[in-house]
Image (spheres, rainbow, N blue to C red):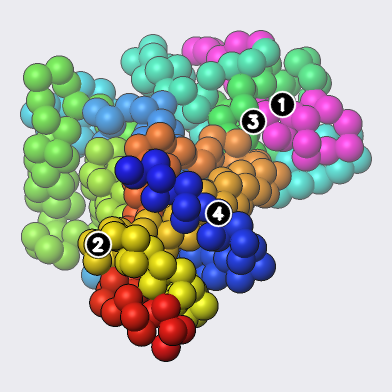
Amino acid sequence: MIRDYIFFSFNSLKKRRLRSWLTMIGIFIGIAAVVSIVSLGYGMQDSINQQFEKLGKERIIISAGGMFMGPTSDLAATELTKDDVEAVRKVKGVKAAYPILSETASVKFRDETKYLNLFGIPLDKEARKEIEGIGYFDIKEGRQLKEGDKSKAIVGYNIAYNTFEKDIKLGDSIYVEDKKFEVVGIQKKAGTVIHDLLVRIPMDTARELFEEPNKVSTIFARSDIGFVPSEVADRIKKDLADFRNVEEGEEDFSVQTAEKTIETLNLILQIVSIVLTGIAAISLVIGGVGITNTMYTSVLERTREIGIMKAVGARNSQILTLFLIESGMLGLAGGFMGIILGIGLSKLVEVIVALTGLFFFKSYFSIYLMMGVLLFSFLVGCISGILPARNASKLKPVEALRGR
């Protein structure tokens, strides 16, 4: 019976092809917007989770500056120092902690000069082990910096291949703030602007170069096995505040865990996705109104047909079901086309983002998402067709045969 309903509804829509296409426009535009927004939102969340896996969920980041630092604050007082690193190392649950000195520096290769981000990193055994365990710093060619290196440098993938007119190769010389460095390593493509446009040099050399004997830009810590990173982070925040003699709630530094950062970013993405999906759903309402109008017109045009069906024994429930399925098929067809358009839009955004260098970003598609969208579009069609279908089912056979 259902098969007959579907066949009959399909033939009816086929006879009114132009009207059916025009009716479905509102539906498939709305569905396309919803599919693209949801797939991009989930894709972004998945990409963020993958990137933080490279960093390690057990890692804790301590940086200068707090929520209560105003424009008149003394910037020098907010800087982290070597002593802060030692204080963090003494906190219970901290497995390792090491400093990073970050500066923007002029980098010259051949006759070209660019201003790039530079990391000064410590070269002791423990720090090197921690740094080499971060996926962002994996080496494509050459080697990592080692103890005893002075004027050696590692360059990011984009610096080596996309920044200067000529590619940088192992053994080439670059000049950082007019000081000569030999390139001993080229990083693998990380897919992030920060790490692919990064120059790494030894910490001691960086301190001499920028005349910063005590400054620390960021402290990277790692919680020990058996300790919860968030709890260790809370202890670091308390102990470091005591060490720096600042009141609780007025810290001039921030402590973040990779896990907490992931949760915050995912929450923001979910809120944005919900808001955008709600806006996109407005077009679905418009599409639903279009289906209602089309079905009312269809009922008026087929009044005699309805009268004949009732005259030969069709029940009200069967007429109702027939028109509901027809309106549902309008929604379903619009949903199917919307999915195709939505996937195309998501892939287009993925390609555009990739052109900016963020190759880690991928849109996300799930069979459950597609099935859910199709079911939803079918329900939108059915709901939009309830009133016209009910009117059709209530027509009296004699009046319907007269075309009234």
- Camera-nearest label, 4 or 3: 4
Which residue is tagged 1? 181
Q: Quadrant of the N terminus?
A: top left
What's the distance in space between the residues labelled 4 and 2, CA to CA?
Answer: 21 Å
The one of 340 and 78 positioned closer to us in this rendering? 340
- Camera-nearest label, 4 or 2: 2
Q: Quadrant of the C terminus?
A: bottom left
Task: Assign a secondary structure to mark 3.
Answer: loop
Which residue corresponds to the image point at 38% horizontal and 72% vertical from the top-left?
Answer: 307
- In the rendered image, the vertical position of residue 104 relative to residue 206, given as above or below: below
Lateral position of residue 356 relative to residue 294, left or right: right
Q: For residue 150: magenta?
A: yes
Task: Assign a secondary structure to mark 4.
Answer: helix
Residue 233 in sight in this render: yes
Lateral position of residue 86 relative to residue 5, left or right: left
Number of numbered labels in the structure image: 4
Residue 245 pos. (x, y %): 13, 56
Task: Assign a secondary structure to mark 1.
Answer: strand
- Name the N-terminal-most of marks 3 and 1: 3
Write down the region rendered in magenta. 142-168
What's the distance in space between the residues labelled 3 and 1, CA to CA?
Answer: 15 Å
Task: Assign a secondary structure to mark 2.
Answer: loop
Q: For residue 209: magenta?
A: no
Which residue is tagged 3? 156
- Camera-nearest label, 2 or 1: 2
Residue 279 pos. (x, y %): 41, 72
Q: Residues within 10 Å of mark 1 (few under 14, many from 20)?
A: some
Which residue is tagged 4? 11
What mark, if any, has residue 315 been given in the picture?
2
What's the distance in space between the residues labelled 4 and 3, CA to CA?
Answer: 61 Å
